[in-house]
Image (spheres, helix red, strand yellow):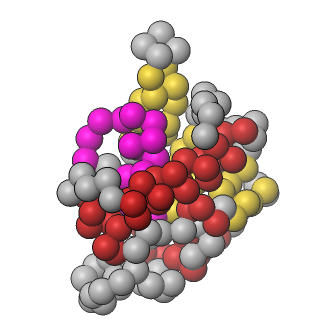
Amino acid sequence: MGSLSHRDFYFVRHGQTDHNSGKIEGEHLDISLNKTGRGQAVAIEPLIATLPLRFACLSPLRRAKETTDILLRNLPLKRLEVAEFSECALTTWNQMRKGDLSDPVAQFLQTVAIGLKQVLVEKGPSLIVAHGGIYFAICKTLGIPGDGIINNCVPVWFHFNEKKDLWQMRDCI
């Protein structure tokens, strides 16, 4: 895959859906935000407006698009849909969380890394609006320790620490 550019970027997991809240069980669906999810996006919109963003990348799934629409409604930023940032299948997500590096997990991690490389080639910083599985895969790709779990609509800043020669991240809230 080659090395990644060391450009800062921000990540936001889409707002809550009925699937996230436990009202819908089973496979990840291309569903809309629920009322709580729309409220979560509205709540962080002022913070997003203060970030030094140059463009936004988003998953092609409806919940990410709706979150992006709310977050950027007053910002004239270029938007780029990144197919590689679609959410993984539920079985892949469960395998990733268990540390299982089966073929579907390895393929998903590689796909997300390809999408991330596309984003980091652009002059940033960028905003990525996607899914929990994408966040997990980005953290693994960048070697960031932790459980790779992120709540809905929590902005996170990723940056490369030149002195320590590693990627780091922190919540923006």
Single out the residue that lies furthest toward the top.
Answer: 163
From where the camera sits, is residue 80 visible?
A: yes
Horizontal and vertical percent position of residue 165: 47, 16
Depth order, front residue of 138/63: 138
Tell me the magenta residue range.
131-147
| Horizontal relation, residue 129 to residue 168: left or right | right
The vertical placement of 150 against 60, above or below, is above
Q: Seen in the image, is 76 located left or right of residue 135?
A: right
Total residue callouts: 0
Residue 47 located within the stretch drawn in magenta: no
What predominant SS class does the magenta segment belong to?
helix
Query: In this orientation, which residue lies closer to the viewer: 161 or 114?
Result: 114
Residue drawn at (66%, 40%) of the image: 120
Residue at 44% from the left image edge and 69% from the top image edge: 88
Quadrant where the image shows the N terminus = top right
97 on left or right of 113: left
- The reply, left or right, for residue 55 in relation to residue 129 is right
Asked whether residue 70 appears in the rendered view, the answer is no
- Point out the residue furthest to the bottom here: 24
Which residue is rendered at x = 35% and y = 67% of the image? 92
Identify the image quadrant of residue 59: bottom right
In the image, is residue 31 above or below residue 107? below
Name the quadrant containing residue 97. Answer: bottom left
Residue at the (55%, 48%) spot, across then down: 113
Q: Residue furthest left?
A: 98
Q: Is residue 133 above or below residue 22?
A: above
Does the magenta portion include 140? yes
Q: Position of residue 37 (x, y in %)?
A: 42, 75
Q: Nearer the viewer, residue 34 or 111?
A: 111
Q: Is residue 142 above or below residue 82?
A: above
Where residue 138 appears, x then y in whole percent?
46, 47
